[in-house]
Structure formats: C-alpha cells, structure tokens
C-alpha cells in the first residue's frame, strides 16, 4: 500500500458546472471537498467547503442545490455545505475510479491555483496504475509524490486500538465500504477472529471515532448559523 499525492487539472478549469457558477459569483470562493461519493440512484453526495460572505454563499447554494436538499453551517470563517448533487460525466467517471479500483481518498481534496484539485489517496501500485489508466480524457493527472503508507503516521488510525485498526483495515480490504458492499460481517469476523454478530457494533464505534476526528479536525468553533432543507 502506498500514499500518492496528485494534482488533477480539469480542461477548461472546472470539473462540474457548479464550480463554474461559483467562480462567476462575486464574493464566493471554492476551498475544498471533504467528502464525495456516488449514490446507488445516480446522484452524488458531497461535503463542500466554500469561503466568502455567508449570505452570498447561502444564496448561491439555495439557488443551485435547494431542490435536492442540503444543510449549510458557518464555523468561524469557514462555511460547510452538505448536499446531494447531479454529477456530470467527468465527475461520475472520477468517482467510479475510486469505487472500482480499490483506491481510497484521503480528504480533503483541496482547490489550488487555476481550479486544480490537490488529492491524496491510498492504493497498491497495481490498483493505482489501473485507476490512472481510466481517468477521463477531460482531466490531466500529475503525480507529485509517492511514498509507503505508514498507518502509525495517520492521526485517525493511530487513535484506534490495534484490534480496531486491524478490523477497520480488513473491512476496507474486503470491500465493506464499497458500493455495492462486497463482504459481510461474518466474512470480516472470520478474518480477524471475532464473531460476525459483533463486527457491526465494533465498526460503528470505529466510525463514530472517525466522525469525531473529521469534525474536530475541520471545525474548531460552534456554528453561528444553520439552514436545513
């Protein structure tokens, strides 16, 4: 397993028309994508970070995503949006790469100069090369660094007990977090030597730690305002 640092450069400056409309809106800027995935119904789900005046950001989000349902919160000078969205072909192809080739994103995906995305991911060399070969032609991929994956250096993984870490990594390797799911509690339990009936309970505790880690790393102040749709 290795960690790869990439730069993804969309031809034309945007991966999705939503980004283009953000860039054309005065007082609103793209910052990062903290979570993004495809749903079985073909829609996408994302946690997006924007910057600017909250009222301007809120107006844009409501105009663009209001019909799909969203929440928006302001934490200090950071604004987070969680919403469903309609993926275009480029975004769909990129997300299918992570789903089909056992490539695991390490968020956030950060916007840099020119609308490029700086992306960190984990994969075997074979999986990475297979995934790289099917990146859509509308996106240029630049490999910036490659290094061995050392779980102890990952803050979240280091917070787990050895048994929790083994269970979590086994669940990932067997495809528990794939879409569609590729394994069962019983299969995971056999690999790690615990009863299948308790695997779900253990994974939920691990996932709760993951949520706490993500929130504490991304949000340092209480929300000032919240809009629920």
Image (tube, grey):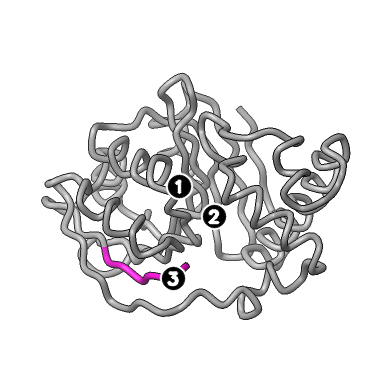
> Mark 3 — residue?
2
Quick one: label 3 or label 1, which is nearer the N terminus? 3
3 vs 2, front mark: 3
Q: Give the CA distance from mark 3 to mark 1.
A: 37 Å
Determine the secondary structure under disc 2. strand
Question: Could you say which disc has been placed on residue 79 in the image?
Answer: 2
User: CB of mark 1 within 8 Å of CB of mark 2?
Assistant: yes
Which of the pair 21/16 is nearer the observer?
16
- On the image, the x and y values in percent for residue 56 come to 43, 47
The residue segment tinted magenta is 1-7
Which of the pair 9/222 is nearer the observer?
9
Instruction: Please tell me which residue is depicted at 32% across the width and 78% down the height of the picture.
Output: 145
- On the image, the x and y values in percent for residue 143 come to 25, 71
Would you call the spot at circle 1 few (<14 residues within 10 Å), some (14-19), or many (20 or more)?
many
Quick one: label 1 or label 2, which is nearer the N terminus? 1
Quick one: label 3 or label 2, which is nearer the N terminus? 3
Q: Is any part of residue 52 visible from this angle?
A: no
Determine the secondary structure under disc 3. strand
Quarter of image, res 42: top left
Q: Main secondary structure of the magenta part?
A: strand
> Mark 1 — residue?
57
Q: Does the magenta portion include 2?
A: yes
Determine the secondary structure under disc 1. helix
Instruction: Please tell me which residue is depicted at 59% across the width and 45% down the height of the picture.
Output: 174
Quarter containing the C terminus = top right
Q: Give the CA distance from mark 1 to mark 2.
A: 8 Å
Quarter of image, res 59: top left
Left or right: where 202 falls relative to 146: right
Which of the pair 64/170 is nearer the observer?
170
Would you call the spot at circle 2 few (<14 residues within 10 Å), some (14-19), or many (20 or more)?
many
């Amino acid at each position: 397993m290795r960690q790869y640092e990439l730069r993804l450069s969309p031809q034309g400056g945007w991966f999705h028309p939503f980004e283009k409309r953000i860039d054309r809106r005065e007082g609103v800027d793209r910052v990062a994508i903290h979570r993004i995935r495809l749903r079985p119904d073909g829609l996408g789900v994302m946690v997006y970070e924007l910057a600017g005046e909250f009222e301007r950001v809120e107006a844009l989000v409501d105009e663009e995503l209001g019909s799909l349902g969203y929440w928006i919160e302001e934490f200090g000078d950071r604004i987070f949006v969680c919403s469903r969205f309609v993926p275009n072909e480029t975004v769909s192809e990129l997300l299918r790469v992570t789903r089909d080739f056992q490539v695991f994103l390490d968020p956030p995906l950060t916007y840099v100069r020119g609308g490029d995305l700086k992306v960190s991911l984990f994969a075997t060399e074979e999986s990475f090369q297979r995934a790289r070969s099917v990146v859509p032609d509308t996106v240029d991929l630049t490999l910036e660094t490659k290094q061995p994956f050392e779980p102890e250096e990952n803050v979240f993984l280091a917070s787990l007990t050895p048994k929790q870490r083994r269970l979590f990594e086994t669940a990932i390797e067997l495809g528990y977090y794939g879409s569609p799911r590729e394994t069962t509690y019983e299969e995971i339990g056999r690999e790690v030597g615990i009863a299948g009936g308790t695997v779900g309970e253990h994974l939920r505790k691990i996932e709760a730690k993951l949520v706490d880690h993500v929130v504490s790393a991304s949000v340092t102040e209480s929300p000032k305002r919240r809009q629920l749709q």
